[in-house]
Image (cartoon, rainbow, N blue to C red):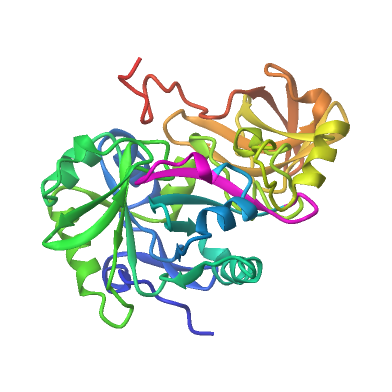
Amino acid sequence: MDLRKTHIYAYHAEHGNIVDFGGFAMPVWFEGIIPEHHAVRNAVGIFDTSHMGRVMAEGPDTEKFLNHVVTNDVSKLEPMKGLYTVMCLPDSGIADDLIIYKMNAEKFFVVYNAGTREKDFAWLEEHSKGFNVELEDLSNKMAMIAVQGPKAEETLQKICKKSLSEVGRFNLAMATISGYKVMLARTGYTGEDGFEIFIPDCPLSNPEKALKIWNDLVDAGAVPCGLGSRDSLRLEAGLNLYGNDIDEETNPLEARLRWVVKFKKPDGFIGREALLKVREEGVKKTQVGIKMVERGIPRHGYEVLDGGQVIGVVTSGGLAPSLGYGIAIGYVSKMYSKRGTSVKIRIRKRLVEGKIVKSHPFYDDSVYGWKRGKK
């Protein structure tokens, strides 16, 4: 099967180590996962995120429609601001997590995961019936590049005419970068400060705008980064990966996402009744962070134990390059979720000691991440 290519593929083919990522030909690394990870934590890196899903929703009922399909309250958004949320199935399982940006009263921009692009668009179309809203899938017509790290603003400013210091976190803005009109948002998936650039009128058949902006960012000092460092960075930040940490078998109350569930929205939302029942009965399992106390690297699917009893499972794990030890996100029985609780993880044939810790983020956010220097 031919792998799908993004707008930046020509650069990856020349410089990157390409893998099959959900049917897309994507770079797992350029120079290496560890140096790319440190580049983002300490300076600035760029990621090709053009494989993700992008939809424009427009019409008189757009806000009402989006509020029906997501758990967070879209009506609270001011123009040119965004919020993180999830879409639930009627049984409370998570269909996907996404960001919604409000452009104006009748126009919203929606960004969701690459692996769920077709599924999500079909879900939105299906549930738009009865609402006066038009949906346009822009995924193949609009490129997307993430600029992340404590030097993201300084680096992007070199090729951007707009004053980036005026763009607040989770705000959307129109700007000119490398001579092209773009949208950009002060968001990302690394825990660091940074921007996501959306390049309109840039079809896969004519990706020159995206390649120009990408190469100009490299020339300005940004380090090209692949999927490997994207995963280690988001894991250190305690951010969920759809398909690993959250999925259709997980509900947001189990997944530490109670804050994006607004039960009091006047018209409700898909999955509300099932989630109310979960809230009433209490969750059986809950998401936790685990720090390895002994040497060992936890991985997806590894068992979490108390004594000889299996109490949970690792959903994401690996070495934290910024911290120098293994960390994991996983689910355990509610009674074992208290911070400081000692657990074991079965790594091959060994039981390796770990403990439950704060995981959003795992690092000290006065040292790393977008909050550094803000306290």
Q: Looking at the picture, tell me which residue is in the foreground, 20 or 270.
A: 270
The residue drawn where x is 30% and y is 69% is 8
The residue drawn where x is 38% and y is 40% is 170
Does any portion of residue 51 appear in the rendered image?
Answer: yes
In the image, residue 165 above or below residue 203: above
Residue 161 appears at what percent x and percent y?
A: 11, 49
The residue drawn where x is 65% and y is 66% is 127
Residue 150 appears at what percent x and percent y?
A: 27, 34
In the image, residue 282 above or below residue 45: above
- Looking at the image, residue 94 sits to the left or right of residue 295; the answer is right
Q: Looking at the picture, tell me which residue is in the foreground, 153 or 27.
A: 153
User: In the rendered image, which quarter is residue 349 located in?
Assistant: top right
Question: Magenta stretch containing residue 80, yes or no?
Answer: yes
Q: Which residues are magenta?
A: 74-93
The residue drawn where x is 27% and y is 73% is 201
For the C terminus, the quadrant is: top left
For the N terminus, the quadrant is: bottom right
Question: Magenta stretch containing residue 60, yes or no?
Answer: no
